Image: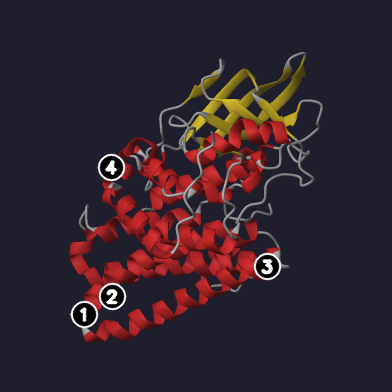
C-alpha cells in the first residue's frame, strides 16, 4: 500500500518546518543536514515530494511554492537549502528518464527513504578550460562504465545515489552532448575524498569523487542541450533568503539606532523588488539574459546586506561565532556557486568600478 505524502508546506506549515530546521542548524553546519536530521524533516513535512510529479509518487508543487520554500529555508539554514537544491537538480534529471527509471527511484526520494545528489559541475563551469572531458563514459556489454572525476559533489559521503553526466569516449571534446547516469554510491570503483574545508557551508559535505571503471545503475536519455545550464532561479532564491537573514540582524540594530532605519528600509525595498521579480518569473517565465541579471542583482545585494549588518554590529560582529560573522562568510558563497560567465564578469566589473557590457570582450579572453 502506498503512503500518501503530506501536502507541500506553505504558510503555517512552512513556518513550522523552518522552526524545526532552525532547531538543528548548528548540528547541520557541523555534520550536514543528512546527519542532523534536517533532510528527514524536509521529507516528513512533504517538502521533497513537491518536486516530483504525482504520477511518479510526488505531490507536484508549483514553481512559485518551490521558490517560496527555498527562500524560507535559506533564511533559516543555508546549508540545508544548498543540499536541497542539489537534491532537486538530481531529481529533475531523473524525472526526464523512462517510466521504469522514474518508478525505481522517485517514490523513495520523495519519501526520504533514499537520498541523492548531483555531480555535474564538470559539464558546466568546473575545469572546462582543460579542453577535454574529465569524466568519460564507455559503453560495455552490461551498459556503461565511467572513468574520471566529479570535482564538486554536495553530500558525497552522505547520500545513496549520485546523478552525474559524462561524455562518451568517442566524443572529441568536453562540449559534446553528455549522457546522464545514476550511480549507487556503494559501487566498486567510487572513491570519495574527505569533505572540503570551505570558507563557509562546510556542513554541505562537498567533496570530489574519483571514478574508476564504475558501472552505472541506470542511464537517463541524453539531453538536447550541450550540458546543464547554470544560474537557475533557485540560486537567486537562496541569495534572497541569505539576504533576509542579514537584514534581520540589521533590523535589530536599527531598533537601538534610528540612523540605521533608512538603511534597513532601503535594503528591504531592494530585496522585496528582487523577490517580486523572482515570483513573477515562476509564473510568466524569464529569458536567460533577464535571469542572469536577476542573479547578479541578488548576488550583489546578499554581499552588501551582510556587510551592512556587520558594520552595524561593530566589533561584536567580527568575533567568530556571532551570527553576522557566519553570514558574511556564507554571502561569499554566491560569488562562486554555479555562476554563469556573464554574471561572474559583471560582478568583477562592479568590483573594479568599471561598466560592464554584455557584448564586450570576455575578461577571460587571453
Badges 2 and 1: C-beta atoms under 8 Å apart?
yes
Q: CA distance from mark 2 to mark 1?
A: 7 Å
Badges 3 and 4: C-beta atoms under 8 Å apart?
no
Q: Quadrant of residue 39?
A: top left
Which residue position holds label 3?
286
Determine whether 339 is above or below 137 in the image. below
First in sequence: mark 3 or mark 2?
2
Q: Nearer the viewer, mark 4 or mark 2?
A: 4
Determine whether 230 is above or below 174 in the image. below
Which quarter of the rendered picture does the N terminus lie within? top right
Q: Position of residue 220 (x, y in %)?
A: 71, 34
Q: Position of residue 160 (x, y in %)?
A: 50, 28
On screen, residue 77 versus residue 316, left or right, reads right
Q: Position of residue 6 (x, y in %)?
A: 47, 49
* Residue nearer the viewer, 340 or 264: 264
Q: Quadrant of residue 166?
A: top right
Q: CA distance from mark 3 to mark 2?
A: 32 Å
Which residue position holds label 2?
251
Density class for disc 3 (Cα within 10 Å; few <14, some 14-19, many ≥20) is some
Mark 4 lies on a secondary structure that is: helix
First in sequence: mark 1 or mark 3?
1
Q: Position of residue 123 (x, y in %)?
A: 66, 40
Mark 2 lies on a secondary structure that is: helix
Mark 1 lies on a secondary structure that is: loop
First in sequence: mark 3 or mark 4?
4
Disc on res. 27:
4
Q: CA distance from mark 4 to mark 1?
A: 30 Å
Mark 3 lies on a secondary structure that is: loop
Q: Quadrant of residue 74?
A: bottom left
Amino acid at each position: 500500500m502506498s503512503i500518501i505524502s503530506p501536502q507541500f508546506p506553505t504558510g503555517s506549515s512552512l513556518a513550522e518546518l523552518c522552526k524545526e530546521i532552525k532547531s538543528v542548524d548548528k548540528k547541520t553546519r557541523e555534520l550536514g543536514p543528512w546527519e542532523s536530521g534536517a533532510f528527514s524533516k524536509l521529507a516528513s513535512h512533504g517538502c521533497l515530494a513537491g518536486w516530483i510529479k504525482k504520477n511518479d509518487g510526488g505531490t507536484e508543487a508549483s514553481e512559485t511554492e518551490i521558490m517560496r520554500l527555498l527562500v524560507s529555508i535559506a533564511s533559516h539554514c543555508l546549508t540545508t537549502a544548498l543540499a536541497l537544491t542539489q537534491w532537486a537538480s538530481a531529481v529533475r534529471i531523473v524525472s526526464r528518464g523512462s517510466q521504469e527509471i522514474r518508478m525505481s527511484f522517485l517514490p523513495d526520494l520523495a519519501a526520504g527513504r533514499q537520498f541523492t545528489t548531483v555531480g555535474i559541475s564538470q559539464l558546466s563551469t568546473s575545469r572546462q578550460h582543460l579542453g577535454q572531458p574529465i569524466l568519460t563514459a564507455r559503453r560495455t556489454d552490461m551498459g556503461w562504465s565511467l572513468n574520471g572525476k566529479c570535482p564538486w559533489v554536495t553530500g558525497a559521503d552522505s547520500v545513496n545515489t549520485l546523478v552525474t553526466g559524462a561524455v562518451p569516449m568517442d566524443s572529441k571534446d568536453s562540449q559534446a552532448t553528455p549522457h546522464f547516469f545514476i550511480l549507487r554510491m556503494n559501487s566498486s570503483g567510487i572513491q570519495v575524498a574527505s569533505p572540503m574545508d570551505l570558507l563557509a557551508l562546510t556542513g554541505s559535505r562537498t567533496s570530489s569523487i574519483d571514478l574508476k571503471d564504475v558501472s552505472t545503475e541506470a542511464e537517463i536519455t541524453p539531453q538536447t542541450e550541450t550540458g546543464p545550464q547554470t544560474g537557475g532561479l533557485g540560486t537567486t532564491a537562496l541569495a534572497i533568503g541569505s539576504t533576509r537573514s542579514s537584514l534581520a540582524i540589521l533590523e535589530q540594530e536599527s531598533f537601538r539606532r534610528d540612523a540605521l532605519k533608512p538603511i534597513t528600509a532601503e535594503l528591504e525595498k531592494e530585496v522585496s523588488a528582487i523577490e517580486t521579480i523572482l515570483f513573477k518569473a515562476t509564473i510568466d517565465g524569464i529569458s536567460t539574459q533577464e535571469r542572469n541579471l536577476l542573479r547578479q542583482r541578488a548576488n550583489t545585494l546578499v554581499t552588501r546586506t551582510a556587510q551592512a549588518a556587520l558594520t552595524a554590529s561593530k566589533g561584536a560582529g567580527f568575533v567568530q561565532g556571532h551570527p553576522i560573522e557566519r553570514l558574511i562568510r556564507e554571502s561569499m558563497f554566491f560569488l562562486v556557486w554555479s555562476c554563469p560567465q556573464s554574471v561572474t564578469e559583471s560582478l568583477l566589473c562592479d568590483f573594479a568600478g568599471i561598466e560592464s557590457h554584455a557584448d564586450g570582450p570576455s575578461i577571460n579572453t587571453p
